[in-house]
Amino acid sequence: MAETFPAKPIRLIIPAPPGGGTDGMARLTANALTESVNWAFVPENLPGAGGNIGFDQTFKAPRDGYTLAMGESSNMVVNQFLYRRIPFDIEKDMLPIALIAKVPLVLIVSASGPHANVGTLVAAGKKASLSFASSGNGTLAHLVGEMWKRKAGINMQHIPYRGAAQAMTDLIGGQVDLFFASIPVALPMIQGGKVRALAVTADKRVPVLKDVPTMAEVGYKDIEASVVFGLVGPAGIPSTVVSRINAEVNKALVRPAVAQQLAAMGVERTAGSFGGNPESLGRLLREERAKWAPVIKTSGATVD
């Protein structure tokens, strides 16, 4: 079966709106596989309920490898702790296939605002409540914001949006004070002078933002986080097909043109940050759930 796979186009569900990080990573992966092995994809954006709607469609699809989804931290890791009711069991119904990328966040503010560094932002937050945007409840941007406000000892109100694009618009317009955005989403606005980057949540500086310090460098060593993007499908896909998809994804991601594109987006390219086998992705997701579950509990965040 793996020798003849795929014999038809693959439906790629994107459980997020167009224009955000998940959408971009899904289309990059599909294009990379099309160029590498001439596979055909039919991308389909199915946003809603933090990605649960798209995942529900994915996990109810035939278990033949012809329906896949681009998952990310919120729907693969966080939602099971955030929602009281989900129409599937993420640990039983989702099959991890390939780690696509781990992407750090960057703390950004409006370029027209008064804050030139994290210090002035914290000082402002100790005097009056700040607002921080996210692309939705339970996203990594939300959780990192909750974690940081406690570490910094400041007051901040969470403002969730339906996707990163709207959050970015309001940040630039001054409707919110700050945003922990994924680097691929923020980079064009940073380079265009619309927003100011204050710190990254990586363990070391990011080459595309080499002048931007890490959170550890500005005094918050425990604020390290990366959005995990993974290709997943419904549990029960034949192992030979899973192995074939995994192998082709890994080969496509290291092609020079794709590697350059990922690096330009700020994607980590160190060992363990992309590729590997399905088991290693499953192990990473379990580690991420253990890390973020207590943060969600402490924050008191819920959706329904």
Image: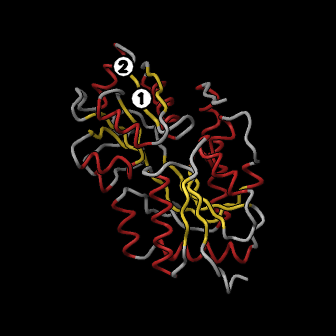
Residue nearest the viewer, comparing 153 with 115: 115
Which is closer to the viewer, label 1 or label 2? Answer: 1
CB atoms of marks 1 and 2 within 8 Å: no
Q: Secondary structure at mark 2?
A: helix
Q: On the rendered structure, is 101 left or right of 85?
A: left
Question: What whole-number distance in Å separates the C-alpha atoms at marks 1 and 2?
Answer: 11 Å
Where residue 133 appears, as percent x and y from the top left, is 43, 32
Name the image quarter holding residue 80.
Answer: top right
Residue at horizontal 36 percent and vertical 31 percent from the top:
178
At label 2, which amino acid type do we have?
A: Gly
User: How many labels were placed on the picture?
Assistant: 2
Where residue 290 appears, as percent x and y from the top left, is 66, 42
Which numbered circle lies on residue 132?
A: 1
Name the image quarter holding residue 63.
Answer: bottom right
Q: Is residue 300 above or below residue 36?
A: above
Please name the colour scheme applied to the rendered image: secondary structure
Residue at horizontal 37 percent and vertical 56 percent from the top:
266
Which numbered circle lies on residue 291?
A: none
Q: Is residue 246 above or below residue 127?
A: below
Residue nearest the viewer, comparing 231 with 282: 231
Residue nearest the viewer, comparing 74 with 51: 51
Residue at horizontal 50 percent and vertical 53 percent from the top:
22
Residue at horizontal 47 percent and vertical 42 percent from the top:
163
- List the residue tagged with mark 2: 125
Where residue 94 appears, as percent x and y from the top left, is 71, 56
Quarter of the image with the N terminus is bottom right
Q: Secondary structure at mark 1?
A: strand
At label 1, which amino acid type do we have?
A: Phe
Q: On the rendered structure, is 12 left or right of 163?
A: right
Quarter of the image with the C terminus is top right
Please report whichever mark, 1 or 2, sits nearer to the chain's N-terminal start: 2
Where residue 171 appears, as percent x and y from the top left, is 34, 33
